[in-house]
Image (tube, rainbow, N blue to C red):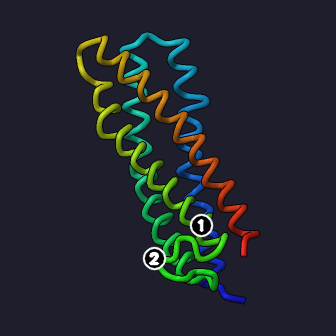
Amino acid sequence: MDFLQIGASWLHLVATVVLLGYVGVMALVVLPVLRRDVELSTVCELTAAFERRALPGVVIALVAFLATGVYLTVSDARYGGAGNVVGSSWATIITLKHVLVAVVLGLGLYADGLIARKLTVADASDRRAALSRLDVVVKAMTVAGATVLLLTAVAAEAS
């Protein structure tokens, strides 16, 4: 039994749950409830506070996710090297998965860097627009994250 492989797989799964759980809860619970029941300025303040509170855990999970993901990929017997993106069905699926992971990370940086920061500006129309964009981005991240999980399951069965 390879305890390093087991530990890396477990940590990768925990980090995935933290990252996708955060985004999913934002997309499917927090934003819909706040937008429906709370005044705009309060929604923006609460959303920004929620993100600030979650950020350290998200960053730790992201580092663990990326580090264990690299280890798990390169330690897999099916891994044929960084340039081998179509050498097998597994390589193709893993490449697609990693491209989608990069999209999710890019959307996350966009959400944090451009949108969430605008939630604290004084102009109500800017806040409303930023909140609407954040809503779309976290929903897209949730769908993309679920697709990453699907590709992971498919890759596990691929040769």
Instruction: Tell me the amino acid under the disc marked 1.
Output: Thr
* Mark 2 or 1, nearer chain start: 2
* In the foreground, 123 or 56: 123
Instruction: Tell me what residue is drawn at x 57 percent, y 76 percent.
Output: 72
Q: Classify the position of the C terminus by image quarter.
A: bottom right
Q: Describe the element under mark 1 as helix, strand or loop.
A: helix
Whether residues under marks 2 and 1 lie with C-beta atoms below 8 angstroms apart, the answer is no
Q: How many marks?
A: 2
Instruction: Tell me what residue is drawn at x 57 percent, y 80 percent.
Output: 79
Image side of residue 129 versus residue 76, left or right: left
- Residue 126 image offset from top left, x and y in percent: 29, 17
Q: Classify the position of the N terminus by image quarter.
A: bottom right
Image side of residue 111 versus residue 124, left or right: right
Task: Quote the CA–CA distance across marks 2 and 1.
Answer: 11 Å
* In the foreground, 62 or 143: 143
- Residue 13 image offset from top left, x and y in percent: 62, 62
Mark 1 crowd level (few <14, some 14–19, many ≥20, 10 Å Cα): some
Q: Describe the element under mark 2 as helix, strand or loop.
A: loop
Q: Residue furthest front?
A: 86
Q: Residue furthest bottom?
A: 1
Q: Locate residue 75: give its quadrant.
A: bottom right
Q: Which mark is residue 30?
A: none
Instruction: Tell me the amino acid under the disc marked 2.
Output: Gly
Question: Up-down: is 128 above or below 20?
Answer: above
Instruction: Tell me what residue is drawn at x 69 percent, y 54 percent.
Output: 150
Question: Up-down: is 106 above or below 135?
Answer: below
* In the foreground, 127 or 103: 103
Instruction: Tell me what residue is drawn at x 52 percent, y 19 percent.
Output: 34
- The residue tagged 2 is 83
- The residue tagged 1 is 92
- Residue 90 image offset from top left, x and y in percent: 65, 71
